[in-house]
Image: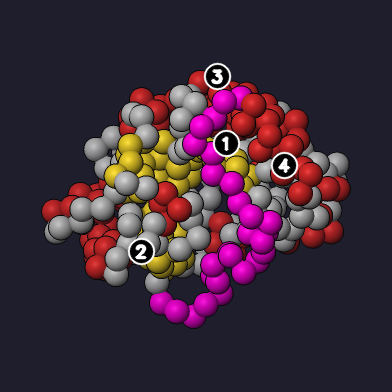
Amino acid sequence: MRVAKVMLHRWEEPFLAGQGGSGAVFFTGCNLRCAFCQNRPISAQDRGTTLSPSELARRMLELQGQGAENIDLVSPSHFVGEIVEAVQVARTLGLSIPIVWNSNAYELPGTLGRLASSVDIFLPDLKFFDPKVSVDLCGAGDYFAMATKAIRSMREIAGLARFVGARMVRGVAVRHLVLPGLADETHAVLDWLAANLERDTPISLMRQYTPMYDAVDGLAGYPALSRRLTTHEYRKATDYAEALGFTNLWLQEKGSASESFTPDFDSTEEV
């Protein structure tokens, strides 16, 4: 496996980060090519260190020892076999905190089935609805069809969301990044979630979009992506979600749209 960074990540949703932070493992590479990706130094470049399953297991145990609330596997989809082996080794050696599968949901149900005994919490994105938008912005016209099948599979594997106090320990929580100028995409995504998941499913409506890389100067056909989300746009999204009856919504403050919340992948700190 190629791993770009291992760290205590305190900026995940509160039901994940808790008091100790998530034990984040950022994998190198990604099976999408989002034009506005904030993690481009690792998603589209070969930065990182090669780790064997046993070495990753050791890092998981170190994170648990540092007080991590869970092991947060970020963009892990292309290392499924190695990750399953690492989790098995780590649990044999005493890992007891939940495993979080933090992915873009562009995955096959059969692949996800291999994770049934290893993953406790699925944290998928549901990014886009319209095939034209998804092919333009992430290079995958079948994104919505694939991602919705994957989310249904995740729900079958993990079951209803379960909490111990305020901390999530099992189930599915879905993220959606609200994008400037694309309100129809957000509404369509929320419509599908309301029709296919329980209304108390944790839904994270993210306000953190920050123009970076290709998006800074604007993308052809999507000029609004050169700016941050307005308060009106975000309020429109949250009002729509509330009107659909979601009871476990997680929202972000305006200040979350900042490069300061993106981990420093240029750091010379060892993985």
Query: Residue at label 4?
Result: 235
Q: Please tell me whether mark 2 sits on a helix, a strand or a loop.
A: loop
Residue type at mark 3 is: Ala
- Of callouts 1 and 4, the N-terminal one: 1
Which label lies toward us, 1 or 4?
A: 4
Quarter assignment of residue 110: top left
Residue type at mark 4 is: Arg
Residue at (73% x, 61% y) in the render: 213
Q: Judge left or right: residue 13 versus residue 237.
A: left
Q: Do the residues labelled 1 and 4 touch (CB within 8 Å)?
A: no
User: Where is residue 185 shown, x and y percent of the image?
Assistant: 71, 32
- Of callouts 2 and 3, the N-terminal one: 2
Q: Judge left or right: residue 213 versus residue 52.
A: right
- In this rendering, the answer to whether 258 lies above or below 124 is below
Q: Do the residues labelled 3 and 4 touch (CB within 8 Å)?
A: no
Q: Please tell me whether mark 1 sits on a helix, a strand or a loop.
A: loop
Which label lies toward us, 1 or 3?
A: 3
Q: Is the magenta stretch mostly helix, strand or loop?
A: loop
How far is mark 2 from mark 1, CA to CA? 27 Å
- In this rendering, the answer to whether 111 lies above or below 164 is above
User: Where is residue 150 shown, x and y percent of the image?
Assistant: 46, 30
In the image, the segment drawn in magenta is 244-270
Query: Residue at label 3?
Result: 195
Depth order, front residue of 79/90: 90
Q: In which quarter of the image is the C terminus?
A: bottom left
Which label lies toward us, 2 or 1?
A: 2
Q: Residue 20 carries which label?
A: 2
Residue type at mark 2 is: Gly
Residue at (26% x, 53% y) in the render: 97
Q: In which quarter of the image is the N terminus?
A: bottom left
Query: Residue at label 1?
Result: 126
